[in-house]
Amino acid sequence: MRFAERMSRLGTESAFEVLAKAKQIEASGRSMIHLEIGEPDFSTPDNIVESAYSAMRSGATHYTPAAGLPEVREAIAESVSARGGVPVRADQVVVVPGSKNILHFLLLSCVEEGDEVILPDPGYPVYRSLTDFVGARARPIALREENGFGMDMDEFESMITPRTRLVIINSPQNPTGGVLSSEQLDRLAELAQRHDFLVLSDEIYSRICFSELPRPLWTRDGMAERTVVLDGLSKTYAMCGWRLGYGVMPRELAQRMETLMINTSSCAAAFTQLAAVEALRAPESEVAVGQMVAEFQARRDLLVSGLNSVPGIRCHLPSASFYAFPNVEGTGIPSRELASRLLEEAGVAVLAGEAFGDAGRGYIRLAYTVGRPALEKAVERIREFVASASPATVS
C-alpha cells in the first residue's frame, strides 16, 4: 500500500507506547507501578454519570448541531466567563470529541504551509506532530528549570519572524507542571499584537492548580480577538474516556471550525454534551473537583519530597497539573535509558523527557495518578535502582 507523504510527519504519544509495554510486562506476572499516563485515577463524579444515563434514556442519542448543543455552548461560555471575568458568548464556543481537534482545526483554518509555529519545549508532543503534519515549521522555545519552566521572553521575542503565524502556550504545563507568570503573559500579549500572530492557549489543567493562577492571556486588552482557548472536561472531572473538549475563539473562526466538524466527526455525542452541563453547573461536581485537587497536592508533596531524597535526582515543585518532572542528570544515566530501565528492571513506568522535546533531555516525567502508597513504593524502587545502577554499569 502506498501512503501519503504527510503520514511520515505524524508522531505518536510515548505515554501510550510505554503503557502498552508496561501492560505486557505486567501480564507476565511482574509488579508494575503506572506513572506514565496523564489520566486522573478518580472515577467520574456520580452526578455526572447519572446525568448521562438520564440523557440517554430521554433520547439524547442522535446527531446534534456540529458546534454543539446550544445549551451546552451556553454553559461552557458561562464557565469560561466566570474563570476569566470577561464576557464570552455561546457562539464563540465549539464543542469537539476530544480537545486535540481544536488544535488541528486551528492549524487547518489559519496556518499555511511554510508558516512558523512557536511551541513549548518540553511540551505536549501533539503540538509538534500536528504542526509538522500540516506542513508548517515548528519553532520550539525552551522552557528551562532555572526559570521555573517559564519562557525567557527576550529569547521568545528573538524567535519571532514575519512568518510567525501561531504561538502555542500551555499553562499550567504538561510535562513540567510550570505556570507562566503574569509578566510573561503581559509581554506575550504585547508581542502578539505588535507582530500580528495568533495564540493557542491550552488550559486543560487550569483547574488542577495548587495556588492562584495569573489572569488568563485572553482577558488582556486586544487578546480575545487573537486567542483560541483549548480546554475540556477530561482532567478536571476525570472524564478522559468521555472524549469531550471545547474551544473558545473569535466567532468568525468558530464558524470555520463548525464547518470542519461537519466534514469530520459531525458532532460530539449528545449525552456526553448534556453531562457536561451537569459537570459545569452542579455544586456536587465542584465538591468532587476540590477533593481531587487536594489529593493531587498531597501526592505532589509526597512524590517531590521522595524524589529529592534520591541521590542524583532533583525535582522542581510543580505549581499545578499532576506531573513531576525531575532532573536525573546527577544519576549519570541518560534519561531515555533510565526511563527504559526503570520500566524493565524496577517495575516503574515513567516517560523520558525527550518524549516532550529536546529540552526535556536529562529529565523524566512521572504522573502522580496513583495512590500515595504506590507513590511511596515507586520512590523506593527508583532509589534502589539508582543505587545499584552506577554509571559504570551503564551501556
Image: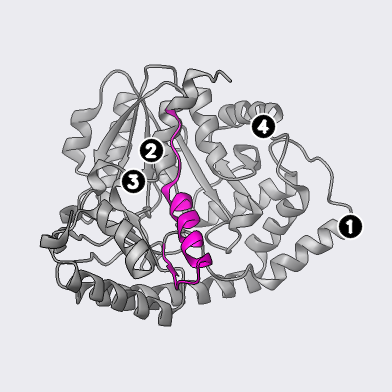
Left or right of 12 in this view: 382: left
Q: Which residue is mark 1?
A: 58
Q: CA distance from mark 4 to mark 1?
A: 25 Å
Q: Position of residue 335 (x, y in %)?
A: 24, 54
Q: CA distance from mark 3 to mark 1?
A: 43 Å
Q: What kind of colouring is applied to the model shown?
A: one colour
Instruction: Decide whether residue 172 is among the magenta residues.
Output: no
Which residue type carries mark 1?
Ser
Q: Is residue 379 above or below residue 330?
A: below
Q: Position of residue 384 (x, y in %)?
A: 24, 76
- Helix, strand or loop status at disc 1: loop
Dot 2: few (<14), some (14–19), or many (≥20) neighbours within 10 Å? many
Give the number of the disc on residue 261. Answer: 4
Q: Mark 3 or mark 1: which is in front?
A: 3
Visible residue check, residue 319 = no
- Helix, strand or loop status at disc 2: strand
Q: Mark 3 or mark 4: which is in front?
A: 3
Q: CA distance from mark 3 to mark 2?
A: 14 Å
Q: Start and end of the magenta stretch?
A: 9-35
Give the number of the disc on residue 168. Answer: 2
Instruction: Decide whether residue 11 is among the magenta residues.
Output: yes
Q: Is residue 352 above or below residue 290?
A: above
At x 82%, y 58%, the residue is 55
Give the number of the disc on residue 356. Answer: 3
Which residue type carries mark 4?
Met
Q: CA distance from mark 3 to mark 4?
A: 28 Å
